[in-house]
Image (tube, rainbow, N blue to C red):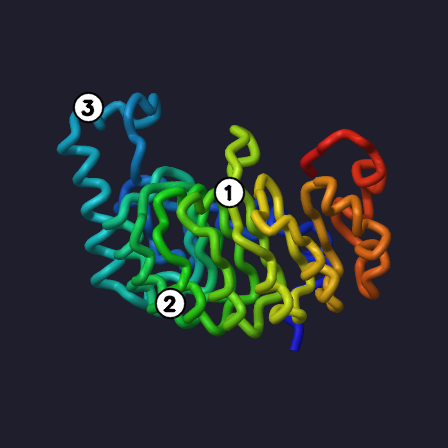
Amino acid sequence: MQKLTQIQIQKGIEYWVKYKTPHKNVVELEEYVDEKELTINCTQLDGVPYYPKYKNTREKKRVLIEWCEFLKENPYAFTSLYFGTRMPQELFNAVCEQKNLKRLYIKWGAYPDISAISKLQELEYLHIGSGASVLSIEPVSELKKLVVLSLENLQKINDYYALTKLKHLELLSIEGDVLAPRYIHINNLNFLREMRQLRSFSLTAARVKSKDYTPILELENVEYLSIEARKEVKAIYDQLIKLPKLKYGGVVEHPEFYKSTRKLII
């Protein structure tokens, strides 16, 4: 049974960032008043004019420690969490104690070991942002209820076959660091042959070592498709555009990119 609406498919991951993230933004634990959805920005407190009291490392560390302790000691507190500042490993591990969490957005951080994420069995939406230090995505494959998965800048990952275990996944976004730009490297796209349930697929700032993009042609249910206009993609563009349910994304909205001799990222 499909869970994402047409607007969610059409707008892609940006819809979740702009319209589905929690509204209240807090730094200190004392600002929290039993909200189930929250944005927590409890790191990178250097030089923030609105918080002049954080003048030393000890004070800044206190803020982080208090949140970590609370998250571990109150495992049913949240259903949705957004982290807009650096995510250290200890905070990541603490977040993974939240048993009712359905949505987790991490903008960026240093968390090489994400094994604890397998505890989040209620998770439906996950964004792992700028995870250059992540060593394995195998734990993500244990999240059987995932519907939306966004993976950004996983520099140490080149095999995504583990994701084929996610049978309820509808939206998958894999990208490098678009702004740098800094590319990620993927061995091949063969995993897509076993993910035909996908309704939305994005692949940007990525280099496929096999140079074979034909597995995308097997995404018979895809409605949104946005991929870099490389020459190998241009070669199969006439087939891509004929995917039976395709109606959104760069492949549909910017055909000129795929017919041009220039290399463009969308």
Name the residue rendered at 42%, 63% in the picture.
140
Front in this rendered view, residue 229 or 151: 229
| Badge 3 vs badge 2, beta-carbon distance below 8 Å | no
Q: Where is residue 244 in the image (x, y as percent from the top left)?
A: 83, 65
Name the residue rendered at 28%, 44% in the picture.
88
Q: Considering only vertical position in the picture, is 34 above or below 204?
A: below
Examine the rendering and report whether any part of residue 40 can be seen. yes
Tell me the quadrant of the picture where the N terminus can be found: bottom right
Q: Considering only vertical position in the picture, is 201 above or below 147?
A: above
Mark 3 is surrounded, within 10 Å at the Cα level, by few (under 14), some (14 to 19) or many (20 or more) other residues, namely few
Q: Disc 2 designates what residue?
A: 120
Which amino acid type is marked by label 1?
Answer: Ile
Examine the rendering and report whether any part of residue 25 can be seen. no
Which amino acid type is marked by label 3?
Answer: Lys
Q: Disc 1 designates what residue?
A: 184
Which amino acid type is marked by label 2?
Answer: Leu
Name the residue rendered at 53%, 69% in the picture.
164
Left or right: residue 255 compared with residue 65: right
Q: Where is residue 69 in the image (x, y as percent from the top left)?
A: 19, 54
Tell me the quadrant of the picture where the C terminus can be found: top right
Mark 1 is surrounded, within 10 Å at the Cα level, by few (under 14), some (14 to 19) or many (20 or more) other residues, namely many
SS at badge 2: loop
Left or right: residue 248 compared with residue 128: right
| Badge 1 vs badge 2, beta-carbon distance below 8 Å | no
Q: Disc 3 designates what residue?
A: 55
SS at badge 3: loop
SS at badge 1: strand
Cα distance in 3D space between marks 1 and 2: 26 Å
Sequence-wise first label, 3 or 2: 3
Q: Quadrant of residue 178?
A: top right
